[in-house]
Image (cartoon, rainbow, N blue to C red):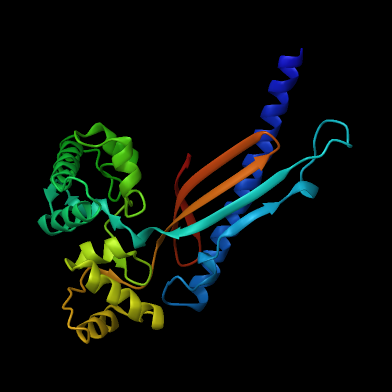
């Protein structure tokens, strides 16, 4: 009976946590939608980039036990610009490998002290999968190939440590996207434009003084530093965001990660997983 009671309590706690996270996700979507109404660019100074620190929810959560037993409930979370990372979907399209994207990913891997050959391995596997989908006539636009970094574990050379190393700088998005130069970190900036860390730091320095207003503005201001970059894969606005959320109620803890696409009037959930 004690085991059954404990099992029911755990199920109840998990259900409460699921509802709290669902509400937090709706809140995050609202923040992003409202942001798009008043700003045509996305950068790290905007409200969506402010993490929700560990916040007590005790008075909103009830315990099924007697009232004098304390309930400890906390919610925390953060929103991350998914286009600040290198989109691995760029490596291949409809079964054809993009050599320029492979070179960028190779540069990034080298900067992270990982084997650069993993870039061609990933591109080949993605292209092969896409060709297979086309032959089977099951290809759906924007939904081809791998979906999360964990899918790379099926390829030779990839391990959990490798995924852990690249997870802050790479991502699989549903379609090809451009890199947001207002939010991209140092390794991504260096790899995307084939420049040294020193030049990438200079770009981040001028970004800290004033965000880039357009791809043309980015190219113009970096050229003043003597850095010549290609701006065809550059953007200052983001469509995809990653949301991380965590809810703990007493001994129960749930952590979720999701990808959403921000549309003109809404935000759609692409995937949701436990972490």
Determine the residue positioned at 35% across, 48% down: 167
Q: 63 or 143: nearer the eye? A: 63
Percent of width and height locating residue 58: 77, 47
Q: Quadrant of residue 146?
A: top left
Determine the residue positioned at 32% across, 42% down: 163
Q: Quadrant of residue 234?
A: bottom left
Q: 119 or 34: nearer the eye? A: 119
Determine the residue positioned at 18% across, 75% down: 229
Looking at the image, residue 86 lies above or below residue 249: below
Looking at the image, residue 28 lies above or below residue 72: below
Residue 9 visible, this orientation:
yes
Q: 142 or 254: nearer the eye? A: 254
Looking at the image, residue 233 lies above or below residue 78: below
Quarter placement of the N terminus: top right
Percent of width and height locating residue 244: 51, 50
Number of numbered tags placed on the structure image: 0
Percent of width and height locating residue 182: 37, 72
Left or right: residue 51 versus residue 126 is right
């Amino acid at each position: 009976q004690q085991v059954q009671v404990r099992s029911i309590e755990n199920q109840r706690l998990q259900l409460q946590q699921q509802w709290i996270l669902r509400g937090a996700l709706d809140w995050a979507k609202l923040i992003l939608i409202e942001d798009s109404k008043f700003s045509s660019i996305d950068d790290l100074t905007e409200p969506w980039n402010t993490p929700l620190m560990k916040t007590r929810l005790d008075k909103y959560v009830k315990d099924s036990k007697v009232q004098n037993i304390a309930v400890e409930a906390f919610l925390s979370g953060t929103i991350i610009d998914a286009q600040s990372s290198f989109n691995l979907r760029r490596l291949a399209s409809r079964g054809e490998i993009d050599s320029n994207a492979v070179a960028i990913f190779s540069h990034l891997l080298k900067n992270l002290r990982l084997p650069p050959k993993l870039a061609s391995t990933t591109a080949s596997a993605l292209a092969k999968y896409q060709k297979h989908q086309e032959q089977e006539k099951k290809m759906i636009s924007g939904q081809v190939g791998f979906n999360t970094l964990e899918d790379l574990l099926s390829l030779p050379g990839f391990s959990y440590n490798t995924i852990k190393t690249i997870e802050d700088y790479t991502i699989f998005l549903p379609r090809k996207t451009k890199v947001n130069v207002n939010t991209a970190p140092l390794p991504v900036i260096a790899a995307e434009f084939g420049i040294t860390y020193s030049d990438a730091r200079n770009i981040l320095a001028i970004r800290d003084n004033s965000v880039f207003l357009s791809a043309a503005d980015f190219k113009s201001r970096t050229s003043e530093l003597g850095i010549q970059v290609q701006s065809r894969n550059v953007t200052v606005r983001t469509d995809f965001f990653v949301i991380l959320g965590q809810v703990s109620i007493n001994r129960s803890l749930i952590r979720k990660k999701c990808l959403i696409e921000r549309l003109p009037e809404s935000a759609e959930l692409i995937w949701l997983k436990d972490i």
